Amino acid sequence: MELLTILGLPFSYLIPFIAVLGIIIFVHELGHFLVARWCGVKIEAFSIGFGKEIAGWVDKHGTRWKLCWVLLGGYVKFEGDANAASLPDGSQQNLTPGMLQAKPVWQRMAVVAAGPIANFLLAILIFAGVYGIMGIPDIKPVVGKLEQGGAAEQAGIMTGDIVRAVDGVSIE
């Protein structure tokens, strides 16, 4: 924590920002990855970040999992993609069953939509978790502080009074 104090306040926000952004990117790309795998698409690479690779490994399916330096996005590279933007590599004449371009339109649409849908589900889970743990704020209509000599004090209202109605209209 002393290092953060030395480096200043902006740096103390940088690490949490990168962590949260990394989680959002991971969940988004995982959505694409899982639906593509379910549809039988061969996946060559799963990357969090762009640019030079920091760390990585190859899983039993032959997918290269990578963490790269520029954490402003990520990608899932499918068989037959020329680059990380999933542009075709020109091998459309020789489509193999593992290529995204060889799949029916509904499967391609599902793979593309899976990332944003995964982020939407993540947001629902986060909000449900926050409300489940912290609950919904409950603000009671209790007078907390009065201005000395103010209208409320002159009307006889005291600190700690519970306001039950305003202008004859009951409040909750």
Image (cartoon, rainbow, N blue to C red):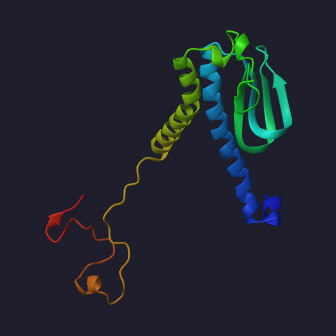
**Residue at image x 85%, y 36%?**
53
Left or right position of 47 against 105: right
Q: Residue at x 65, y 19 (%)?
A: 100
Name the residue: 37% across, 55% down. Answer: 138
Residue pushed farthest left? 168
What is the quadrant of residue 68 in the picture? top right
Looking at the image, the residue that sits furthest to the bottom is: 149
Where residue 153 appears, as percent x and y from the top left, is 28, 84
Residue 21 in percent (x, y) is at 67, 45
Q: Nearer the viewer, residue 5 or 51?
A: 51
Q: Residue at x 63, y 20 (%)?
A: 36
Q: Position of residue 118 (x, y in %)?
A: 56, 32
Viewer-closest of 13 and 45:
45
- In what quadrant of the picture does the C terminus appear? bottom left
Q: Is residue 31 left or right of residue 98?
A: left
- Image height of 78 relative to 85, above or below: above
Left-right relation of 164 to 4: left
Seen from the viewer's position, the closer of residues 123 and 43 is 43
